Amino acid sequence: MKLTAKAKYSYGIGALGKDLVYGIVGTYLMFYFTDVVGLAPAFVGTLFLVARIWDTVNDPMMGMIVDNTKTRFGKFRPWILIGTLINAVVLIFLFKKPDLEGLPLYAYFSVMYILWGMTYTIMDIPYWSMIPSLTKDKQERERVAVIPRIFASIGGLTIGTFGLTFVALLGGGNDVKGFELLAVVIAAIFILSSVITCLNVKEPSTLTAEGTDKKADRVTFKQMTQIIRKNDQLMVFMGVVLCMNLMMQLLGGMAIYYFKYATGNDGMFKIYNGTAGLAEIGGLLLFPILARKIGRQKLFKVGCFIPVIGLVGLLFSGLLAPNQPIFTMISAILVRGGGGFVLASTTVMLADVVDYGEFKLGTRNESIIFSVQTLLAKAASAFSGWAIGVGLQLMGYEANQLQSAGTIMGMRGLMIFGPIVFIILCFVIYKKFYKLNGDFHEEIIMELEARQALKPAKIQG
């Protein structure tokens, strides 16, 4: 089934606002808490970790709720809209510093951050869960899956490159006010982009002729855990995506500290983020073309290899030529261009994992399976946030001060060597265990289509 261009790009634009939100939280929240609000880095890192423990239950539960939703508007769009509206409000309060000090201030931001994670889940899971329901055609799915990733990268590029500039302009030199107003602007864009998606991307009604309370169609908590546990390729996917996200989150969270303190040139942060964002978009745009020419499998492996070279280059450019943007730009292109290939691959992989789950278990559970993607992104964010926060504290980091040689060395380790380890692990897991490629995947699709063709005959009989 081919989608109209209007439907494809309306779906994709929903990721723009969504990832502007994720971008300001993922790129700047640690910095905002430590350098603007003045919270202790170790506390912030621990908060990030503890908040995600709840998500190990919250995210799959949200997937189960979506899969059990029965409305004439479908099961995805209602939750996309509800989640967007709630999360936009929470985002504003997350970046609004109250007139509090000490323990009450710590408690306020702890509650806001946990609420932000919970409400983001409400929107994010149904959004990505729509992909497998839009088309089963392999090449069409590759094209569709890339579009929201491109819009997401545009959102990340914009906030990563110009975020601090916007803060300075909106705040007039007052970072507290600047971050608050930027959050308001992003919340408004978030709502607008989600409304465009919900209006222009149609999905079939999930109301059945027999009624909406048909218990046989509902997924229980026990069934949900079995769906995740018995899908071996989902378990492989979880390992791949967790490692990929850990690489990206460590890079994203450490970059602002690395360039400001380790290289001594915080202006290079904008150059790195801008180049990296454009490179990721380039990788995503090239993905469908290269996937047809050399295959997804080879492209994924190339996407894991290139960032290692880029990270080594980033280390040497920071040591030997911190004021030469060309070396930083080349390194950024390698790191995030290859990352774009991996990012696009995993989006298509997860849609294939949904098909495999239906093939193996006999049930199609997009939202439960896609909830794993949100959970893994949050888990990686939590671990990297904890590692950065606790790491900075142990290194002896002092906000807005000249850092010691030991602190700078620790920053280089977190920025460079941590991501290298995780992208290598990502490659090893994929190469050894992932099997939804080539003829086997084609057999799965043919079998599912054959089962679908038999359904009307069964109903009539």
Image (spheres, rainbow, N blue to C red):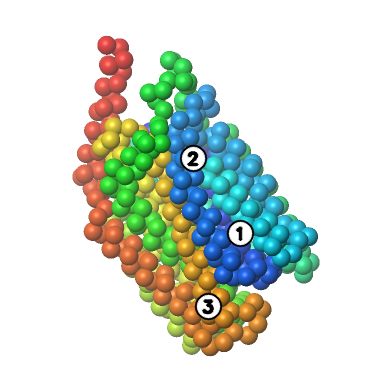
Q: For mark 1, what is the residue? A: 24
Q: Which of 339 and 434 is in front in this view?
A: 434
Report how far apart the C-alphas of labels 2 and 3 lie in the structure.
37 Å
Say what amino acid the circle numbered 1 marks. Ile
Identify the residue at image location x=69%, y=62%.
103
User: Circle 3 sits in a helix, a strand or a loop, which is it?
Assistant: helix
**In the image as oriented, which residue stretches furthest toward the top?**
461
Above or below: residue 31 compared with residue 139: below
Mark 2 or 3, closer to the camera? 3
Q: In this view, does 327 lie to the left or right of 441?
A: right
User: Circle 2 sits in a helix, a strand or a loop, which is it?
Assistant: helix
Tell me where residue 316 appears, x and y as whole percent: 45, 83
Identify the residue at image location x=77%, y=69%.
173
Does residue 40 appear anywhere in the picture? Answer: yes
Res 227 quadrant in image = top left
Does residue 135 appear anywhere in the picture? Answer: no
Q: For mark 2, what is the residue? A: 62
Q: Nearer the viewer, residue 17 or 357?
A: 357
Q: For mark 3, what is the residue? A: 394
Identify the residue at image location x=29%, y=59%.
429
Q: In this view, does 101 lie to the left or right of 50?
A: right
